Structures are given as C-alpha cells and as structure tokens.
Image: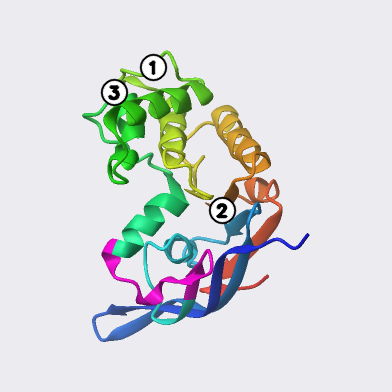
Amino acid sequence: MKQESIIKLENVCKNFEMGEEKVRAVCDANLEVKKGDFVAITGPSGSGKSTMMNLVGALDLASKGDIFLDGMNIEHLPESELAQIRGRKIGFVFQTFNLIPTLTALENVALPMMFQNVEKSEREERARELLEKVKLGHRLNHLPGELSGGERQRVAIARALANNPEVILADEPTGNLDSRTGEEILEMFINLNKEGKTVIMVTHDANLAKRANHIVKLKDGRIER
C-alpha cells in the first residue's frame, strides 16, 4: 500500500534581507514526508535546519516555491486559517520547552485545545490523560520551575499531542538534556511513531539522526540527500 504524503516542499527557497544583502537560508528544496515516517533533518550549525523546520512546520512561508500540508498548498492561505490548520495537524516540541512558567503542567497541556474551542472539562480530562501517558500523572499541578529538564520536555511532548496531530515536529528535543534523559525522550518519539504519528526531528546529532527511518542532510541551505 502506497503511503500518502503529509508534507511536501517543491522547489522551495527562503531568503532573508540583512541590510542590503540577501541571505539564502534554504535553496531549491524538494522534500516529501510520507504519513507515518520518522524523518531526521540534520546538518552543521548554519546549514538552514531551523529555517527548514519553520517551513516544514508551516511556521513560515517560502520566498519561492510551494509547500503542501496534507495535500493543501499553504502558501496562499491567510494566517488565521493557516494557524488553525497548523494547530490541528502539527504538534511542536522545542529544545527550550517553551512552557508558560505561570501555568501548571496540566494548564500548559490544555492550552492548545483552548485555541481549537474544546470545552474546559474535555481539555482538562485529555490533558490529564496525556500527562499520565508521559508518566507525569503525579506532577499535574506543578509549575515548570518545579520540574526537571526531562519532566519539562515530557510536558512539552504531552502538549504537542493535545489536539491529536498527525505530525510531531521536534527541534533539537534532547539538546538541553543529559544523555540518559535524552535517550528516554528519544524513545518516546520512537514509540509515538510506532503508534502511527509522523515524526520530524531537527538535530545536529548524527547519532540521534541514525535512529530515524530517513535522514535529510542539509548543507548551506541545500538538501544533500
């Protein structure tokens, strides 16, 4: 059975203006991610990984070319519509966790559901279930500052799953963690992939990238392979 495409980039370039100079962060990128894939985007610092993540995650639009999310060309959508689609289709996990420090673990996980107009009781029930899934059922009412780095990343993963997205996009998800905790977090992504989630992980760590099914290597804004 042929896998369907979930994300597709066709001849995508992303340029930034720096004074009078134009910087090409990504050049002529062609990339297709199939549903259920586990893809690692890797390359040295300055290779365009962060820009590629923003493009793949529909956080940014291309300067040239087309980006398709689940068959829909997102390049011409208004930001309000794009934000709604992104909120349903993609869950984000960041290196710095990006949790709101004044909200509890439960409230942080429930927050994305608020933007999708989910009822409060349903938000809280699902947030509780997700925190139990990542083995933090005993930390529901703790603030991020009261959690370890590994626990904060688990909360971030639970939050990424809040709207049951098809795609999990992780940007250097183990970058701020010790090796043992990093391995535990990586195993969580592997298990989510086995459950059917499409996982795209941006990393500079070649050993982490090897755990993915496919590796996309960037150099100077271009896909090498």
Q: Secondary structure at mark 1?
A: loop
Residue type, mark 3 in image: Leu
Q: Is residue 163 magenta?
A: no
Q: Residue 16: where, in percent of width, then height?
A: 33, 77
Residue at image coords 46%, 24%? 129
Gap in angstroms between the C-alphas marked 2 and 3: 28 Å
| Above or below 216: residue 111 | above
Q: Secondary structure at mark 2?
A: strand
Residue type, mark 2 in image: Ile
Q: Which mark is residue 105?
A: none
Gap in angstroms between the C-alphas marked 1 and 3: 9 Å
Identify residue for label 3.
143
Q: Is residue 57 left or right of residue 102?
A: right
Quarter the C terminus occupies: bottom right
| Above or below 45: residue 152 | above
Identify residue for label 2.
200
Mark found first going from the N terminus, 2 or 3: 3
Badge 1: few (under 14), some or many (20 or more) residues near its Cα, within 10 Å?
some
Pick the front one: 14 or 135: 135
Provide the residue span drawn in magenta: 67-80
Gap in angstroms between the C-alphas marked 1 and 2: 28 Å
Identify residue for label 1.
139
Quarter the N terminus occupies: bottom right
